[in-house]
Image (cartoon, rainbow, N blue to C red):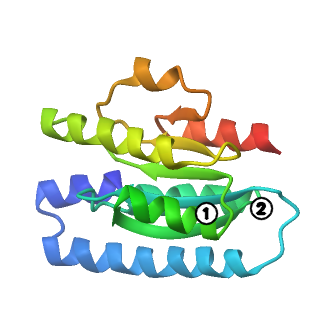
Amino acid sequence: LHEVGLRLYSGYLTVSQEQALLSLLKFHIGHILFKNYGQKSKSPYVISLATPETYHSEFGLLLYGLLCTHYGIKVFYMGPSMPAEGILEISRSIEANIILIGVGNAVSPNKEKFLNGFLERVLKGMSKEQSLWLGGGARFNLPKFQKNRSFNFVPDLKYLDGYLRELM
């Protein structure tokens, strides 16, 4: 995806070509994730994937989902721009142990304030058996949330790989 961005920036790809490529990737990754959810898994974990409302980039989520399926973990893909209440309701109904929220690399102060409030609402609404993992490099109040035992920060795919390996 980084290479696609570079080629777009350099003028080698047009915005239309980029969107067509990303649509193809999204379709094929989505097919893998959907197929995985219907299969039996030996893993006791179910991970729900979403981005907070106003966060529309979903490719990080799709990559998280692929990595989870690699480890045989059942994944439920909710998609981008989900309100906290919707994430909680769906995660309860599918009995997700882990709620993985992808936020990309948003850095604006307005987004930071919103994200802090969003995380507080999700943590407050979770059951004791659930944990919240935040994926991406967005700015938020990390010291505050690290105090909560139900919270894990996953800055990139390498960290996610390590967390998933520990589950197994």
Residue 12 picture location, percent across and down: 17, 64
Amino acid carrying label 1: it is Arg
| Figure check: 142 above or below 39 | above
Residue 113 in which image quadrant: top left
Helix, strand or loop at mark 1: helix
- Which residue shows up at 53% across the image and 51% down it? 100
**47 left or right, relative to 133:** right
Instruction: Where is residue 18? Give x, y as percent.
Output: 24, 71
Circle nearer the viewer, 1 or 2: 1
- Which residue: 60% across, 73% down? 33
- Establish if 99 lies above or below 152: below
* 100 or 88: nearer the viewer: 88
As measured in the structure, the alpha-carbon distance from the residue carrying label 1 to the one carrying label 2 is 21 Å
What is the secondary structure assignment of the residue under circle 2? loop
Question: Around disc 1, counting alpha carbons within 10 Å, would you say few (fewer than 14), some (14 to 19), or many (20 or more)?
Answer: some
Mark 2 lies on residue: 72
Determine which of the numbered discs, if any, sits on residue 143 in the image.
Answer: none
Q: Residue furthest right?
A: 42
The residue at the point 20 percent across, 41 percent down is 111
Is disc 1 in contact with disc 2, using a CB cutoff of under 8 Å? Answer: no
Occupied quadrant, residue 152? top right
Instruction: Specify the amino acid type for callout 2.
Output: Gly
The quarter holding residue 67 reads bottom right
Camera-side residue: 105 or 80? Answer: 80
What quarter of the picture does the N terminus occupy? Answer: bottom left
Residue 100 or 84: which is nearer the viewer? 84
Quick check: 38 above or below 5? below
Q: Position of residue 156 (x, y in %)?
A: 48, 39
| Marked residue nearer the N-terminal end (1 or 2) | 2
Q: Which residue is mark 1?
A: 92
